[in-house]
Image (spheres, rainbow, N blue to C red):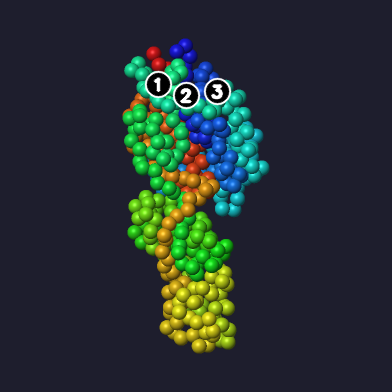
Amino acid sequence: MSERRVVVLGGGASGFFAAITCAESSPETKVMLFEKSPQFLSKVRISGGGRCNVTHACFDPRELSGHYPRGGSALLAPFQVFQPRHTIEWFEARGVKLKTEPDGRMFPATDSSETIIDCLLRAARAARVELIANRAPDRVTRRAEGGFELGFGPGEPLRCDRLLLATGGCRAPAAGQLAVSLGHALEPPVPSLFTFHVAAPWLRALAGISAPGVEVSIPGLRRSELGPVLITHAGLSGPAILRLSAWGARVLHGLDYQASLRINWLPHLDAQKVARQLESHRAAQPARLVVNTPAPPLAARLWEQLVLLAGISRDTRWASLSNASRHRLVQQLHLTELQVIGKTLNQEEFVTCGGVPLKEVNFKTMESRVCPGLYLSGELLDIDGLTGGFNFQSAWTTGWVAGKALAAARPLD
């Protein structure tokens, strides 16, 4: 080869970021980016309901790494050199301002993913990255003298000095086939970030109701999540459920998504405080029906169902509420047990855990430990983050680190 050539496979967030970073850092290197589909950055386009949740306003690397059920420890060092603050600066330097929402999620000020796509395309073209859509190799081999040869059907193979695989999440094992062909293992892909199907008719009848600060847990996960929960026609969704599903992705997969879910509807109050609150209702409004006196912040219809689940009849007034009934209501508020019978993937995020094992990658450079000259980034790795911009941040970070390393790599002799 007369010129130094780097090939990036995968036209998503991480692949684009790596290609741009490499080309800007080493203008004399020819950078080629291949995307198998007709459209670049398709996941960026649909993320966040078309707004693109670019990153999260979390600027401490250690705290940031805690938002990754898999990969947090490996990402700690890369986050020291490229984290959300650098992402914000990168886009603002190219004319894209980001805004922060109350929950920490960050979006382009335009509220349009097209702003991010246009920025990345402009940056790639300005850096003279060759963008090739609708084309991907069906085979890759490492040459004995170094570098790689990419096969595209019966045509002439393409040679390159360095290769980056940024081919996305392994929702099917075949998606990691190129990495496997170059010596890598593949952790089996398992869905992450999904909602729970619950069979209880009383719950489904409350579809559309949300509870703002609920604690949810599954026995055996040794973890609980606190946050908003949304009742749906199929069961339960919302941030607390999605986080619990992410941390428990592999355990729940092993259980075939059949599990007992425990809900504490009033986690900010211990049992004694709840009992005192109920007693104050009885003293202040003895003639009112229990089902008509919800405990804040619970919605009236949700409260009504919890009262009935506690075995308290609809016509019971506070004055006639027995101590035993009050005790059952306290227990119901602190521990409602529901049976999970399945899942629905969160279509906005469609994240999987699984992919290339992290021990097979040097996270200082994103270079493979088993195939010199090969680099890996993004969702192809066994990394997945919680909802809220964390998955994009790991894509930007690993892409940037890989791009810098590709630019600095010693040319082949």
Q: Is residue 371 left or right of residue 50?
A: left
Upstream in the sequence, badge 1 or badge 3? 3
Estimate how packed mark 1 is, as few (under 14), some (14 to 19) or many (20 or more) residues with alpha carbons within 10 Å. many
The residue wearing badge 2 is: 7
Upstream in the sequence, badge 1 or badge 2? 2
Q: Is residue 195 left or right of residue 120?
A: left
Q: Please name the residue shown 46% across and 67% down the image.
A: 200
Q: Is residue 255 left or right of residue 351?
A: left
Q: Quadrant of residue 361?
A: top left
Residues tagged 1 and 3 counted as in contact (Cβ below 8 A): no
Work out whether residue 20 can be spotted. Answer: no
Q: Looking at the picture, does residue 195 appear above or below residue 82?
A: below
Estimate how packed mark 2 is, as few (under 14), some (14 to 19) or many (20 or more) residues with alpha carbons within 10 Å. many
Estimate how packed mark 3 is, as few (under 14), some (14 to 19) or many (20 or more) residues with alpha carbons within 10 Å. some
Residues tagged 1 and 2 counted as in contact (Cβ below 8 A): yes
Q: Quadrant of residue 157?
A: top left
Q: Determine the residue located farthest toward the right in the rendered image.
A: 110
The residue wearing badge 1 is: 148
Q: Please name the residue shown 34% across and 52% down the image.
A: 254
The residue wearing badge 3 is: 130
Upstream in the sequence, badge 2 or badge 3? 2
Looking at the rendered structure, the kind of residue marked 1 is Phe
Residue 1 rendering spot, x and y as whole percentages: 45, 13
